[in-house]
Image (cartoon, grey):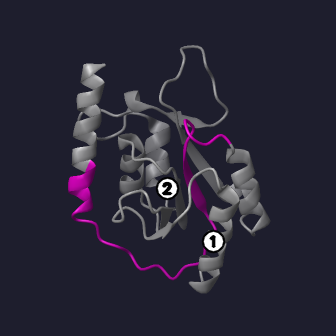
Amino acid sequence: MFLSKIKDFWTKKIVKKRLSNVKHINSDSSIKKVGIIFDESYFYEKEKLIEQLVKNGIYSENIKFLVFKNKVKKNETFDYNVFTYKNINWNATFDSKEVNDFINDDFDLLISYYDTEKAPLLLVTNLSKSNFKVGFTSIDKRLNHFMIDTNAENYTVFIDELFKYLKILNKL
């Protein structure tokens, strides 16, 4: 327990240090491929969120998601990619192949769908090679290119605002 708190603190410190050197990329490409990072401890409606994305013109086969769970039981299996605190090593990198594949995927849009700062979620968002990152205003402002002021339970408001501004920015 004590070591996990130190690891969490250390990872957050590394992410905050990396954020001081962030270079924002200007991308004029349209949104086709979407990646979503969920925090399952606060939001359970991932299917409904994906359904809203599909209603707004994103093809379901172009949507990939990665789910963070605080703890995973030994015999628990998932039909989607899951990561936990245990997947982070002391150098603030990931041991999991699925997480590394997600980070290295060139998404046109990365949705960081979490509104509380947890070190693993911040790290995935920071390391992602995505062209355009969207998240909540409650998260560090240097992490995302665009932020929406709502909470994670209001996924319909989030999607409506997201697509309203993506149309304004000529991303669709």
Q: Which mark is residue 161?
A: 1
Using the image, determine if residue 79 lies above or below residue 20.
above
Outermost residue toward the top?
75
Using the image, determine if residue 120 lies above or below residue 70.
below
Chief SS of the magenta region: loop
Q: Which mark is residue 105?
A: 2
> Which residue is nearer to you in this view: 90 or 19?
19
Assign a secondary structure to mark 1. Answer: helix
Name which residue lies at 61% across and 63% down: 33
Mark 2 Cα shell of 10 Å, populated few (<14), some (14-19), many (≥20): some
What are the residue bounds of the magenta stretch?
Answer: 15-44
Using the image, determine if residue 169 lies above or below residue 95.
below
Answer yes or no: is residue 2 visible.
yes
Q: On the picture, is 164 further left or further right than 9?
A: right
Assign a secondary structure to mark 2. Answer: loop
Amino acid tagged 1: Glu
Q: Quadrant of the N terminus?
A: top left
**Res. 54 image quadrant:** bottom right
Amino acid tagged 2: Asp
Residue 43 located within the stretch drawn in magenta: yes
CA gap, disc 2 to disc 1? 25 Å
**Res. 89 image quadrant:** top left
Answer yes or no: is residue 172 visible.
no
